[in-house]
Amino acid sequence: MDIGVIISMLDATLRLSTPLLLACLAGLYSERAGLFDIGLEGKMLAAAFGAAAIAAVTGSMWLGLLAGMAVSLSTALLQGVAAITLRGNQLIAGVAINMLAAGLTTFLGQTWFHQGGRTPALGAGGRFGVITLPFANELSGVPILGPIYADLISGHYILVYIAFVMVPITAYVLYRTRFGLRLRAVGENPKAVDTAGISVIALRYQAVIITGLLCGLAGAYFSIAQGSGFGNNMTAGKGYIALAALIFAKWRPVPAMFTCLLFGFLDALQIRLQSTSLPFIGEVPVQAIQALPYVLTVVLLAGFIGKAVGPKAGGVPYVKER
Amino acid sequence: MSARRPLPRWADIALLPAINLAMAFLVSGLVVLMIGENPLQAIEVIIYGAFGYGDGLGYTLYYATNFVFTGLAVAVAAHAGLFNIGGDGQAYIAGIGAIVAALALDHTHWLLAMPVAIIAAGAIGGLWAFVPGYLQAKRGSHVVITTIMFNFIASAVMVYTVNRILKPATTMAPESETIEIAGRVPQLRQFISFFGYSPVNLSIVIAILALIGVYILIWHTKFGFAMRTLGQNPTASRYAGISNSRMIMITMTISGALAGMVAINEVMGVQNRLVLDYVAGAGFVGIAVALMGRNHPVGIALAALLFGALYQGGQELQFVIPAVTREMIVVIQALVILFTGAMEGLFRPSLERAFMLLSPEQKAGAIARETAKSES
């Protein structure tokens, strides 16, 4: 295998793991605050639609991005009201959000744009272009390092870079700031946080807001960066893979990045291996590779390779007076 | 404020769900209004499409059959305190059992083929839920996450199985061989011409039997008592000498087997072959059905009928009012789950307060408390 193939595979890995990473970090904030979030998929889907719809109407990718984040944020807040203020079942709230997004995006898409639920294809200004980093072209002639810089590191959408920059930021916020300490505490022992005079409710809403904004970036990536317009159910279960990655990474930011890269790589591999034949194996069953992230997560959760134990207070609404 | 009294039983099982349902419909109506259509006309079309004529009613019952099975699957697990979100995957993978039994016994008689297929589909669906149950009971992995993962694994397995194993070499479409004779479940239209061309079939009898069976299981057997004890208080059930892990595994298996019955209705009753994605989200409708039906067979039957009517009426809707597409039904479904499941806390407190003020002896107590509070 020559270096060109390897680089193009890794390049695809970066592109495919970006939305996973954004959604995974989004989930990390909520879950660390003690809120199970199986509604990542729905928030991304809603954001993808909002971003594409506004970008199509205004012709501006930035307005589209803002709209995507706003839609995702309001969806997250709806989920937050149900799960935090009304103390509803967090899992059921997530299911409802996913279903609501799946139905409403297609429904409104059809009503507004009359293209079978799709939004109009975006022109140049409505969609993010790739960024060529400085000296990428000049350095591409350098052996090995040149192509790596020019083809792998350079030449991505801005959201790709944002996603990977968010990893150290999240790690810093989580482990080095007062907010992060409180966030982790509220997911483990909310009563202790409450006793210290800090509002559990406010902290959890802050987490939900961050989750909403990051899911908005992830959703916008699908429709106005990677794709040029919204298509029915275009997130295609990626929110659940992000959730799997979050568990696989044991709710930690840096391992989350590596897990998302692994799952992204599996996705790239699966696309590449489609209808190709390998010696001894014959035609590769791509379904096996597609199922691998889920199987790995189940195996990990079962404690066969390490043990994934989530935040202790996860899933339990906080009741102040006892 | 803290001295809240529980609602009277009738309000808890009928009034509150009705208010939540009304909210879901109200919001859906606003969505329809927002796009400039008439929600009342939409309701009229849905009701006529679902109940107004033989074919429509037949389709409503056919959809309801699926939703009874998936609703019962969610409810049985819920009684033991488990949230089985994997009904979709369990129903999907059970199709393998149904198609293999139906094709193998295609030249016998449906009275043989149907029970064998029920056992086969139930066994595979049950197995698909048993594994998450086992992992929860013995390894401590959360059943919700595992069943979500199993939905996706099921769909990968099915694509592989249908394309590589069950698809005859002669066809291009990803589907199994067709069931010709005995493997088909008899259609109700063969006996009652009123149903026209609708696909409602004898599986509906299985659904009714399942409703009765689940009722007996949960409220009239020792096992059901143990299940409910586990659901209410796992510590208490352990001290009562019940093996919680065994209960979790058996309950999940029953739950999965019930979801697997969707395969009988779809594979042997409607499609007559195994096709991809035939479950079409019925597993998730089951969550809405169980929530609305309060995990009780009577409630589930009514809720399944309601969703069956919405699905069938929704099909008609897009012919009459093209702007209101089928997805509107998914939106309604989501809102029902949101209001009856996740946002139940929205109306319960005020309803409880209202009832407290309405009943005389509680009113006296409430007034006394209020005055005590204001004086202090």
Image (spheres, coloured by chain):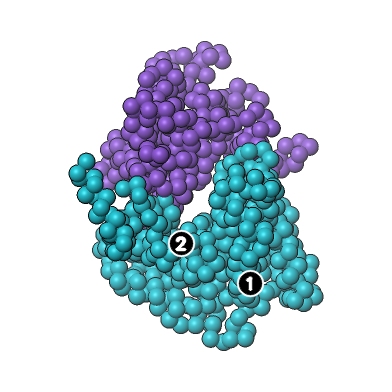
Residue drawn at point x = 63 percent, y = 65 percent? B220
Q: Is residue A181 above or below residue B262?
A: above
> Which residue is more in the foreground, A222 or A246?
A246
The chain coloured purple is A
Residue at label 2?
B292
N-terminal label among 1 and 2:
1
Amino acid type for the residue under numbered disc 2: Met
Residue at label 1?
B209
Horizontal side of A136 relative to B240 (left or right) equals: left
> Which residue is more in the foreground, A255 or B22?
B22
Residue drawn at point x = 43 percent, y = 64 percent? B9
Q: Is residue A317 above or below residue A160?
A: below
Confirm whether residue B285 shows in the render: no
Amino acid type for the residue under numbered disc 1: Leu
Residue B189, percent across and down? 59, 82
Horizontal side of A134 relative to A311 (left or right) equals: left
Residue drawn at point x = 72 percent, y = 37 percent? A278
